[in-house]
Image (cartoon, rainbow, N blue to C red):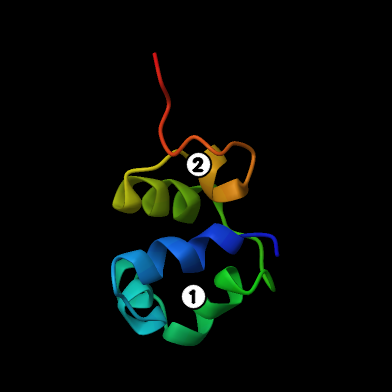
Amino acid sequence: MKYGRLKELRLKKKLTQADMGAVLGMSQRAYGHYENGDRDMSPEVLITLADYYNVSADYILGRTDKRNWEK
């Protein structure tokens, strides 16, 4: 799954796909395509999600297991 962590992050906050669609200004269905890995995210959507969940973009993309950048 391309963006498998999105569901994990969303469920941790007890949000629905419709809730996240509203955060991003899109429908639940459009957001669901990201979560299911059916569509690629734009950099703007990725940054918005990383900021919303307070994690790094690399964490969302599965490039690291560290939720945030450490200095």
Along the line of sight, the residue nearer the viewer: 57 or 24 = 57
Badge 2 marks a residue whose secondary structure is helix
Task: Say if residue 24 shows up in the picture.
Answer: no
Q: Which residue is mark 2?
A: 57
Q: Which mark is residue 63?
A: none
Q: Which residue is mark 1?
A: 31
Specify the quadrant of the image occupied by residue 70: top left
Q: Amino acid at mark 1?
A: Tyr
Q: Is residue 28 left or right of residue 23?
A: right
Residue at far top of view:
71
Residue ID at (50%, 62%): 6
Q: Horizontal and vertical percent for residue 38?
A: 69, 73
Q: Horizontal and vertical percent for residue 36?
A: 63, 74
Q: Is residue 6 left or right of residue 71?
A: right
| Sooner in the amino-acid sequence: mark 2 or mark 1 | 1
Residue ID at (39%, 42%): 55
Badge 1 marks a residue whose secondary structure is helix
Along the line of sight, the residue nearer the viewer: 68 or 35 = 68
Task: Say if residue 43 shows up in the picture.
Answer: yes
Q: Horizontal and vertical percent for residue 59?
A: 53, 43
The quarter of the picture where the C terminus appears is top left
CA separation in Å, label 2 and label 1? 17 Å
The quarter of the picture where the N terminus appears is bottom right
Q: Amino acid at mark 2?
A: Ala
